Amino acid sequence: MHHLYKNWAKYGLLLAAIMLAFLMNSFRVLSFAVILVWLQFVVYLLHEFEEHVWPGGFKQFINQKIFHVFDKELPLNDANIFWINILAVWFLFPLFAVLSQYVSVPLGVLLPIFGLFNASLHIIFALRFCCYNPGLVVSLILNYPTGIYTLYYFYQHELLLARAVWLAIVITLFMHALLLGYAVYRYRRQADGE
């Protein structure tokens, strides 16, 4: 597992390239709305690559800038970053893309809403700390433009249904609150143990 903990985001870059090639050849079999939904997963894989591989350093940014921990991998370490991203992105994004493709296209709105919310956090961190944070560049040049365009396209084609949007917002806020809660819990637990 140690290898996966260290290299999962590198595999994400390969997966993004494969998925992008597939999407570019899918215009005859998938609706454009569904292609836009799947594209959000590709963009998020690139976002994770920037955060954790090149230039990387997201773990250190959160641990040091947010939690002021400089000598330990706390609250984030390679193992919990792996599981957080596998469950929150590698499971959730494809699940809702498949639901969008086979059940109801509007369910795919989760992907741009989740991506835009997360990208906004990177921008807030950049403004708050007056510095770059890993994930910021992809947030600005890919997450925001593709996310906004996807929402605009959904709106123009009457696919932006209130129930789907509210579900996406609730899931997005719940997942981010859960992740923040987990990080705070690990931080406090470790601090109490010292």
Image (cartoon, helix red, strand yellow):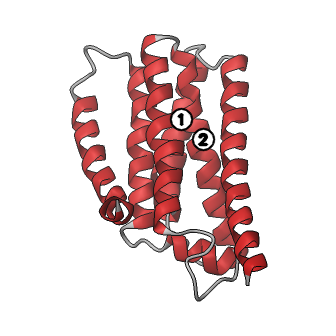
Q: Residue furthest top?
A: 103
Helix, strand or loop at label 1? It is helix
Asked if residue 97 shows in the view, the reply is yes
Residue shown at the point (53%, 35%) measured from the top left: 111
Q: Residue furthest bottom?
A: 71
Disc 1 residue type (three-letter): Leu
Quadrant assignment, res 72: bottom right
Residue shown at the point (41%, 63%) measured from the top left: 50
Horizontal and vertical percent for residue 2?
35, 65
Question: In front here: 146 or 113?
Answer: 113
Question: In front here: 114 or 89?
Answer: 89
Horizontal and vertical percent for residue 173?
72, 42
Q: Which mark is residue 190?
A: none
Residue shown at the point (69%, 82%) measured from the top left: 68
Helix, strand or loop at label 2? It is helix
| Residue where numbered disc 2 is placed | 114
Work out whether 171 lies above or below 118.
Answer: above
Rounded to the nearest angstrom, the CA distance separating label 1 from label 2 is 5 Å
Work out whether 20 lies above or below 26.
Answer: below
For label 2, count other residues whose C-alpha is less than 10 Å away and answer few (under 14), some (14-19) or many (20+).
many
- 146 left or right, relative to 173: left
Asked if residue 130 shows in the view, the reply is no
Q: Residue furthest front?
A: 193
Horizontal and vertical percent for residue 182?
68, 57
| Residue where numbered disc 1 is placed | 111
For label 1, count other residues whose C-alpha is less than 10 Å away and answer few (under 14), some (14-19) or many (20+).
many
Disc 2 residue type (three-letter): Phe
Circles 1, 2 touching at the beta carbon (< 8 Å): yes
Work out whether 125 lies above or below 82.
Answer: below
Horizontal and vertical percent for residue 184?
73, 64
Quadrant for the N terminus in the image: bottom left
